[in-house]
């Protein structure tokens, strides 16, 4: 099991180039199936979830190649419409192959998707969206089977602005002749990024980033496309929290303030100084933090992102006063709390609510990551703890953070990866 040893207490100083967005890379790599041509994705992070997506593309008959930060996909060899559970189970992001395969071939047979254990992760909104497009969907107990016998453009109405369901609706509708309007669509920046890629293929998409997206399906696709992924806003938020936790001055090159505004505003309320550059963000923390004067409620974008809740919780552990979190997006997203309590944190979890009372010190401990963002949160806390922490389960963190240990070391953290 991969481990990370952190000796806390070092002030951070330096710059990090923010990686490309994991949650843009996954739907856009899947979307590379649509055209049957060649796609080059730039700023593509070297993380295990991207490796898993490339394995699925190869299984489907596509040719993939990585050249540094760029990934090349030739989908002319696409030859099958099934993805076995052995490939689907590694991440939730594999679900976006549903819309891409349907767009290309009009049918799909998928094993059940995986993903961090954040509580139930149903797919009812995805299924309803496909049915809204006239696509038959069946769950036969072993796998999910979809068939576009008589697909039709029209209205896809989402009961909740699900990111994944919006992506699948957008991808599937791109292959259905006519106009489709997606109502109550997710507004995350990754949706806009996927729409921008589809537009490069020649698919007319409008309204991405708002709650209503219109797409003209069934057009002739361009056979080559290049696309550069947006920066990973959750990785950026995580490094902001690391700087707030450890103290010092950290610059994030490539960060987009608007994408992390809800996190930056809270860190600023807590006493950090945030400076925005042309294409960068800087956080300076040189005095004790105090709890933000309001409850932190996780919401769909542009609300406070659920993925930033664990790292921000870690950054609040030493802040004066009480910080209250309300996690509305996933049922079990406080798995980092018991591990943080081992370090001396004062956290009380009661269902969806977690209350963090600032303590005077944290002590390094043996910690265990249970999910991607929770694992990153343990490192954020360890940076501010006295003594040494060893975090196991870093495979979870490697799913979404490119070179996490090297990034921390590059800004002065005493961090060492261990096998
Ligand atoms: C995406 O997951 C992200 N993953 C998640 O990031 C992120 O936490 C989440 O969006 C919310 O922002 C990727 O993009 C690969 P949802 P997704 O569908 O699409 C419920 C990370 O750490 N729901 O927007 O699975 C669901 O249970 C990961 O990078 C249904 O009820 O999230 C949840 O409560 C973790 N039925 C809420 O909607 C459905 O059919 C939001 O889920 C689908 C979702």
Image (cartoon, rainbow, N blue to C red):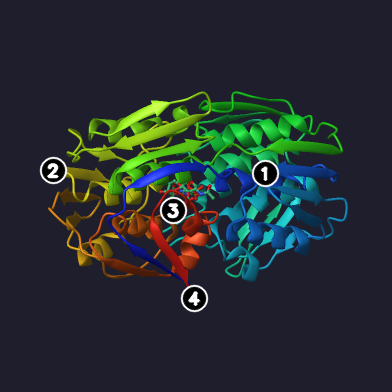
Asked whether disc 4 touches disc 2, contact meaning CB atoms under 8 Å apart, the reply is no
Asked whether disc 4 touches disc 3, contact meaning CB atoms under 8 Å apart, the reply is no
| Mark before the other along the chain sequence, 3 or 2 | 2
The secondary element bearing badge 1 is classed as helix
Residue 152 visible in the displayed image: no
Q: Is the residue indicated by label 1 positioned so its CB lies within 8 Å of ligand 1? A: no
| Mark before the other along the chain sequence, 1 or 2 | 1
The secondary element bearing badge 2 is classed as loop
The secondary element bearing badge 3 is classed as helix
**Mark pair 4, 3: CA separation:** 18 Å
**Mark pair 1, 2: CA separation:** 42 Å
Q: In the shown orientation, is residue 308 left or right of residue 84?
A: left
The residue positioned 77% from the left and 61% from the top of the image is 58
Q: Is residue 181 above or below residue 50?
A: above
User: Between tags 4 and 1, which lies in front?
Assistant: 4
The residue positioned 84% from the left and 59% from the top of the image is 79
The residue positioned 69% from the left and 48% from the top of the image is 29
Q: Position of residue 49 (x, y in %)?
A: 59, 58
Packing grade of label 2 (10 A; few <14, some 14-19, many >=20) is some
């Amino acid at each position: 099991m991969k481990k990370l040893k952190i000796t806390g207490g070092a002030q951070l100083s330096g710059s990090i180039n923010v990686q490309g967005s994991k949650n843009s890379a996954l739907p856009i790599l899947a979307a590379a199936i649509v055209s049957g041509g060649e796609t080059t994705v730039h700023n593509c992070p070297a993380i295990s979830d991207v490796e898993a997506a490339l394995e699925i593309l190869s299984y489907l008959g596509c040719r993939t190649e990585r050249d540094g930060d760029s990934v090349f996909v030739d989908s002319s060899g696409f030859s099958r419409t099934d993805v076995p559970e052995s490939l689907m189970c590694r991440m939730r992001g594999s679900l976006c192959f549903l819309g891409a395969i349907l767009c290309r071939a009009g049918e799909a047979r998928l094993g059940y998707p995986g993903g961090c254990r954040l509580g139930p992760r149903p797919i009812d909104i995805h299924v309803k969206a496909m049915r809204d497009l006239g696509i038959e969907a069946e769950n036969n107990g072993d796998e999910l089977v979809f068939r576009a016998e008589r697909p039709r453009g029209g209205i896809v109405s989402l009961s909740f602005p699900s990111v994944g369901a919006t992506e699948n609706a957008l991808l599937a509708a791109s292959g259905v002749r006519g106009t489709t309007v997606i109502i109550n669509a997710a507004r995350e920046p990754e949706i806009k990024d996927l729409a921008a890629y589809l537009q490069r293929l020649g698919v007319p998409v409008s309204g991405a980033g708002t709650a209503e997206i219109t797409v003209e399906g069934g057009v002739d696709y361009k056979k080559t496309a290049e696309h550069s992924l947006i920066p990973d806003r959750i990785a950026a938020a995580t490094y902001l929290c690391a700087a707030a936790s450890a103290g010092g001055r950290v610059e994030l090159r490539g960060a987009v303030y608007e994408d992390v505004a809800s996190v930056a505003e809270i860190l600023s309320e807590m006493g950090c100084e945030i400076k925005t550059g042309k294409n960068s963000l800087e956080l300076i923390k040189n005095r004790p933090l105090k709890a933000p004067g309001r409850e932190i409620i996780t919401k769909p974008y542009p609300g406070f992102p659920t993925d930033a809740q664990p790292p921000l919780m870690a950054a609040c552990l030493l802040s004066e006063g009480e910080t209250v979190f309300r996690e509305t997006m996933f049922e079990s997203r406080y798995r980092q709390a018991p591990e943080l309590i081992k370090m001396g944190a004062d956290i009380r979890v009661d269902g969806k609510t977690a209350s963090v009372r600032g303590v005077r010190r944290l002590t390094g401990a043996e910690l265990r990551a249970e999910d991607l963002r929770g694992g990153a949160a343990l490192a954020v806390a360890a940076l501010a703890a006295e003594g040494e922490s060893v975090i196991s389960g870093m495979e979870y963190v490697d799913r979404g953070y490119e070179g996490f240990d090297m990034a921390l070391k590059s800004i002065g953290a005493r961090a060492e990866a261990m096998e």
